[in-house]
Amino acid sequence: MSAVKRVLPMLDRVLVKRFEAVTKTASGIVIPEKAQAKILRGTVVAVGPGARNQAGDHVPLGVKAGDNVLLPEFGGTKVELEDKQEYLLFRESDILAKVE
């Protein structure tokens, strides 16, 4: 079982894998890390069941695993799993948009 499948976000939290930064130009020039633009898009990997309303029912999330989303420049909790990849944990309300 992969490490990502064992991470189950709670309530309205969403686990996101940020897109990889472009490290080379089309002509093969390597871009230094400081000059790379911050990546503000990612793919949803896992979602929680949703926050609870006053009646105690789960309110479903607007995103699901596999969706591409637009992320805020700052925020999110970094999570490093066994596969040595970095993921971010956001509340659903922190995600700016779903990209189609």
Image: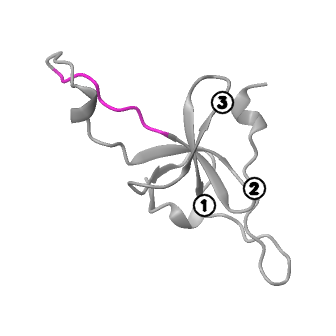
**Residue 78 location (% of width, % of height):** 56, 42
Residue hosting label 1: 91
Residue hosting label 2: 10
**Residue 17 location (% of width, % of height):** 53, 39
Q: Residue at x 44, y 54 (%)?
A: 71
> Tag 2 or tag 3, which sits nearer the N-term?
2
> Tag 1 or tag 3, which sits nearer the N-term?
3
Q: Residue at x 34, y 32 (%)?
A: 21
- The answer to whether residue 65 is above or below residue 59 is above
What type is the residue that disc 3 sits on? Leu
CA distance for labels 3 and 1? 19 Å
CA distance for labels 1 and 2? 10 Å
CB contact under 8 Å: marks 3 and 2: no
Name the side, left or right, on which 84 lies relative to 49. left
Residue hosting label 3: 81
Q: Residue at x 73, y 26 (%)?
A: 2
Front position in the image: 77 or 13: 77
Name the side, left or right, on which 54 lies relative to 80. right
What type is the residue that disc 1 sits on? Arg
What type is the residue that disc 2 sits on? Met
Question: Quick one: label 1, few (<14), some, or many (20+) residues within 10 Å?
Answer: many
